Image (tube, rainbow, N blue to C red):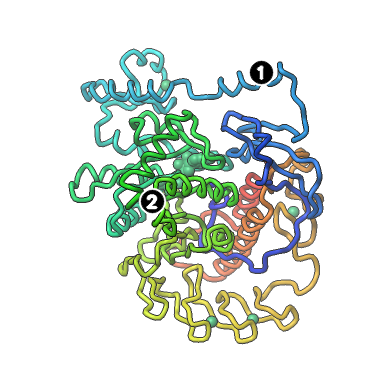
Amino acid sequence: MAAPRDGLGAVETEGNGGRSESSGAEVVLSSDPATPAPLCPHGPTLLFVKVSQGREGTRRFYACSACRDRKDCNFFQWEDEKLSGARLAAREAYNRRCQPPLSRMQCVERYLKFIELPLSQRKFCQRCQQLLLPDDWEKHGEHQVVGDVSLTQLKRPSRLLYPLENKKTNAQYLFADRSCQFLVDLLSTLGFRRVLCVGTPRLHELIRLKASGDKKSNIKSLLLDIDFRYSQFYMEDSFCHYNMFNHHFFDGKAALEVCRTFLQEDKGERVIMVTDPPFGGLVEPLAVTFKKLIAMWKEGQSQDNSHKELPIFWIFPYFFESRICQFFPSFCMLDYQVDYDNHALYKHGKTRRKQSPVRIFTNIPPNKIILPIEEGYRFCPLCQRYVSLENQHCEHCNSCTSKDGRKWNHCFFCKKCVKPSWIHCSICNHCALPDHSCEGPKDGCFVCGELDHKRSTCPNISTSKKVNKYCLHRRGRRDMKMSLKFYRAVRKKKQRKSNKMKMETTKGQSMNHTSVTRKKERRETAHQYLCS
Ligand code: SAH
Ligand code: ZN
Ligand code: ZN
Ligand code: ZN
Ligand code: ZN
């Protein structure tokens, strides 16, 4: 997950997609296979097209697939640009220099040496995020070093390593114990024997921890992740350094084969892929990658199994439902709210759940997935699935219609259920927030979401950022639009909440910032995210 998940409590998105935005860049997926994309340190780049006033430009360019911030990877090349041999060679050298200092094999060797050491000699450098062998001690003498690294600690690297916090490229949001436990139990109940963990290091380690403690649930797990630090803790067959936005294995064919073998083992039976991608990432390249992994699994299937699908859990915010289902029509969204550890606002409160917007999308029939009653879920016999307690079955829609865990209301004019905060507007002829404006520019400013100006004249954008020639922040216009709506909605929501709070003193719930600072913070987050 990445930046936009920041600062969110209860979430509300505004409806109505399909509005055109002004400018940005969009990913072009159908790049000609005859002209392979140039490589950046993160593997093959993606082809983008500049979009101006909602119209596609003609000149297309390549940029990094993984990094949404030019500071993290500044690769740029026009599609029709011809590079000299010298420049190509320099680029190749640069790409090599950017690779991790140790090979995958060296990491494994170091790990094997490390676990042989007596406890007192097992040290971990916090500054360098690295397990140290005695030969390394001197070099890290001045650094903050943790001693007595136990085997238990080694089995939980996601607790030893600090979560990466680079908001745009690699923010890591780790599952809260309760959600992680729920996932592991669910996978085991569903009878899976192998789990391909794509960007889920904490799930990976919990599966392995369980497997080693309990003979019955001997589930195997393979982690694919771009965070190279994890390679210190796993052998070649349980971690591959991988980019999920372009299906790139950093360690080449050998790693790809590890993945293939894992998927095809046991005739491809009882294997599932679980992924929790950075939310700031684009849905489209992810879908392309997942289809490649599915194809890899399918190769190992016999002909008469060709109708079968690789089971998948794709963990992502609920407002991406239509996007995900566009690429994977067989997926449905479960009501289960996935909680995170290093995210105060997503944590379950002691009394009430903080409404996490993150859900599980899956092609496993939802009636097979039991959600925990004690966490506030119930079975709806009409829908044949578990839903949030507050998600009531609407007899008109014949479905439990809520998406966000609150009770939705049926609107007879719109002929569908809508969010509790919405009312039917007879001018707009559909339901909307009471304070919406019926006419006028609904798009508003792309940066801050205010309706009275456009991005180019936004007072909230620093002048240096105003002119951002190759601003990639809207590589997927639609996906980003969703994020923006999300921001606007959160801001409005919080605004309302803080106004309310000013009037009534609430018990226990502390509001340590003033609403003004809050607003500013949120704006900054939005800026950080939206403007590379
Ligand atoms: N909730 C998960 C972690 C999700 S955070 C858990 O607790 O296990 C997103 C994860 O995706 C991180 O581990 C991050 O390192 C990884 N990631 C981010 N960008 C990636 C990319 N381009 N390719 C592969 N993994 C990526
Ligand atoms: Zn160090
Ligand atoms: Zn209804
Ligand atoms: Zn209505
Ligand atoms: Zn603005």
Give the CA separation, mark 2 to mark 1.
46 Å
**Mark 1 belongs to which amino acid?**
Ala
- Can residue 1 be seen here? no
Would you say 326 lies left or right of 261 here?
right
Q: Which-is-in-front pick, marks 2 and 1?
A: 2
Would you say 101 lies left or right of 41 here?
left
Residue at left offset 43%, top offset 75% = 390
Horizontal and vertical percent for residue 180? 35, 52
Horizontal and vertical percent for residue 69? 63, 38
Horizontal and vertical percent for residue 231? 39, 30
Q: Which circle's residue, 2 or 1, is located before the other in the chain?
A: 1
As drawn, the residue found furthest toward the left would be 215
**Figure quadrant of residue 166:** top right
Residue corresponding to mark 1: 90
Residue corresponding to mark 2: 302
- In the image, residue 261 above or below residue 452: above
Crowding around mark 2 (Cα neighbors within 10 Å: few <14, some 14 to 19, many 20+) is few
| The label number, if any, that marks residue 222 in the structure image | none
